[in-house]
Amino acid sequence: MNSIGIDAGSTAVKLAIYDGKEFDLRIRPTGWSPKETVSKMLEDIENEKYIVTTGYGRMSIANYDKRVTEITCHGKGANYLREQTRTIIDIGGQDSKIIRVNNKGQVIDFLMNDKCAAGTGKFLEMTCHLLEKDIRDLDEFVNSTNPANINAMCAVFAESEIISLLASGERLEDIAAGVIDSIVKRTLSLIGRVGFDEDIFFSGGLSRSKVIRKCFENTLKKKIHTHKHSQFTGAIGAALIGYEVMLKED
């Protein structure tokens, strides 16, 4: 019997299938309906399964055995990917969060910003749309030593500020670098309130960007670790939690 962790994010649905030894990782754009996307992803999984859901869209998924908060799943998943992890930085499509965990990946404390889009992946996605760039190409075109100042505290006003910078002839890479700098500083402001312990792990889709990770390191003056599967941190954690439940029930 497989344990399946489903992290239904606002941008992508991540699925982790765990048999107790190895993970099979899959991802699809969330689209208009997390429920429909998850249903399609589960169609070709024929073996008996225990399903744990987490993430932004977890409440919309009908067929599940257990629901777990993304905070708990990220703690568990980060501990699996890097067992030295004590602090997790995660920037999702709809929120950003700082999570402190112990040596077993259990959550000690956390703080989430889900009130303002200006500190989220959705804001960076919007910026790339304005700049007519693909967010997946950030590391290729953001090579700036002079980030533009993005002063607005609200995503709506920040968008107007970006449009004004474009109209004034500001370089695209400087605008993008300024937005990244703004997102990083907003996220790290949470650390000032919740604190952090080293080792620091960067999870989520944006952790694939070397530019963003470097900005975190330069601002925090600390080494930031990640993993090639860091985008699946929540799904992996959910699958591990499900597998532990299965073992207890046997």
Image: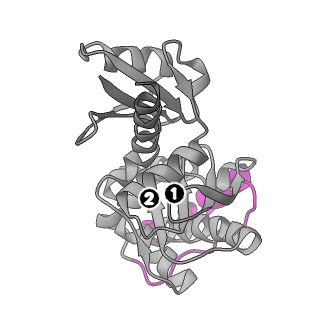
Residue 248 to residue 86: above or below: above
Mark 1 sits on what residue? 105
Give the side of residue 196 with respect to residue 45, left or right: right
> Which numbered disc covers residue 247?
none
Give the side of residue 150 with respect to residue 62, left or right: right
181 or 2, nearer to the observer: 2
> Which numbered disc covers residue 79?
2
Cα distance, mark 1 to mark 2? 5 Å
Helix, strand or loop at mark 1? loop
Tell me which amino acid carries mark 2: Asn
Rendering coords of residue 220 (x, y %): 57, 81
The residue at the far bottom in this view is 221
Give the side of residue 205 with respect to residue 22, left or right: right
Tell me which amino acid carries mark 1: Gly
Residue 73 to residue 60: above or below: below
Rendering coords of residue 98 (x, y %): 62, 61
Q: Residues within 10 Å of mark 2 (few under 14, many from 20)?
A: many
Residue 210 to residue 52: above or below: below
163 or 100, nearer to the observer: 100
